[in-house]
Amino acid sequence: MAKRSIFRGFAAVFAFGMCITGFTGCSGKKSTDGKTEIEVVSYKPEAVKAFERIAERFNEAHDDIHLTISSPNEAMTILKTRFIREDYPDIIAIGGDINYSNFLDADLFEDISDLDEVQTVKQAYLDMDKELEFIPKDGTYALPYVANAAGILYNKDIFEENGWNVPTTWQEFTTLCDEIKQSGVLPLYLGFKDTWTCLAPWNALAVGLTDSDTCNQVNMGNTTFADTYGPVAEKMRALLDYAEKNPYAYGYNDACTAFARGESVMFPIGSYAIPQIKSVNPDMNIGSFTFPANDVESDNVLNSGIDLQFSVMKACKNKEAAYEVLKYLYEDETIQVYLDDQGGIACKEGDFAIPETLEDMRPYIEDNRMADYQDHHYPSEMSVDAMIQTFLLDESDNAQEKFLKKFDSDWKRYNRDLIRKVQDYQKEQEDAQ
């Protein structure tokens, strides 16, 4: 029963995955030299070198456990295929997103709340994982490792040359954009030809203008997107007044290049874009600030999500060895190896360096004023990025009303089973009281 609920459309994934070879689970078995084999499959192929170093260091320090960390391309497809075959790795390394929610809902993960390292995780990231649970569960099922942050990238040199300050409210932000526009420079570059880029400012606005559990509240029938997403849609459209003409003609790479060349002063995108920007202008002095979505600074929230976390599979044959791996991964020195290679924000409490480009976000990070990307709760089939682009292209008087109505109707369409499950759980809780 659990296997059938892992992922919608699993049969298609399975057909594709049957062509993939070379990944077989160790599941805590003993190798020929008597060591316990622990296999981790990571969804981040870009971090393969960091994980190779970490695995090598672990194996040098342990005589009784051999650790293998695989970071294949199409890792999620491989994992879903392996789950169907009941060929489970011991630990998986994935993001805090809808895939984690689906796997957790399929009862694939071990409760690791008895792992001491859980107590050292920043509370904001533990809360994010709790909000990714379709149905509330007792326990902890992932160890958050590294997070990212998204707001607005800005050209620090241009800001300094003109005496501009980082805005902290929506009024300050629009006033700054007007001033930049009047000076003959483009305030923002959007690059909305690639529809996924529409989600960057959308998410960064939504965390400050809506509750972090909005999607779950909709599933419970307590609200609608028409009632909650209005201010997000309004301010999303307002960005068009300060951006390049016809932003739908330019994609992500175009926006990165334009920003790198000083064609705009700001770029509403996540910190993940910085390497691409610096490939064009290695000397660019880039900063990033929290999207000032509100009229009062204290209401603003940093858009930060779990980029990488570790979950122990229930099928793991040697939990003790798996825990030993997690303990090693969560040592400060090991985390720093990963951060030095990949950047990001440590999910563990402690004295970890914050990248200079995220320094303006430090108060939010240190005060746990953070909330997850709303799109981590959106089903991929719903294609919310394309919906946002279509809404922005629509210049009719009732464009926003149509967009929000469609958001609600499509949500019900693509989440029908989940909504029923959530509401059945609610009724059970009410009946038990």
Image: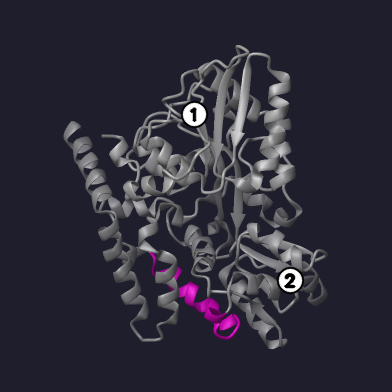
Of 418 and 55, the residue lying toward us:
55
Q: Nearer the viewer, mark 1 or mark 2?
A: 1
Residue at position x 57%, y 57% from top? 298
| Residue 196 in view (yes/no) | yes
Front in this rendered view, residue 189 or 299: 189
Residue type, mark 1 in image: Gly
Which residue does the image show at 29% across and 52% down from the upper left? 219
Amino acid carrying label 2: it is: Ala
Residue 17 spot, x, y in % from top left: 43, 45
Mark before the other along the chain sequence, 1 or 2: 1
Q: CA distance from mark 1 to mark 2?
A: 44 Å
Q: Which residue is mark 2?
A: 260
Q: Quadrant of residue 275?
A: bottom right
* Residue hosting label 1: 25
Range shown magenta? 229-249
Question: In this rendering, would 328 be left or right of 133?
Answer: right
Quarter where residue 107 is shown = top left
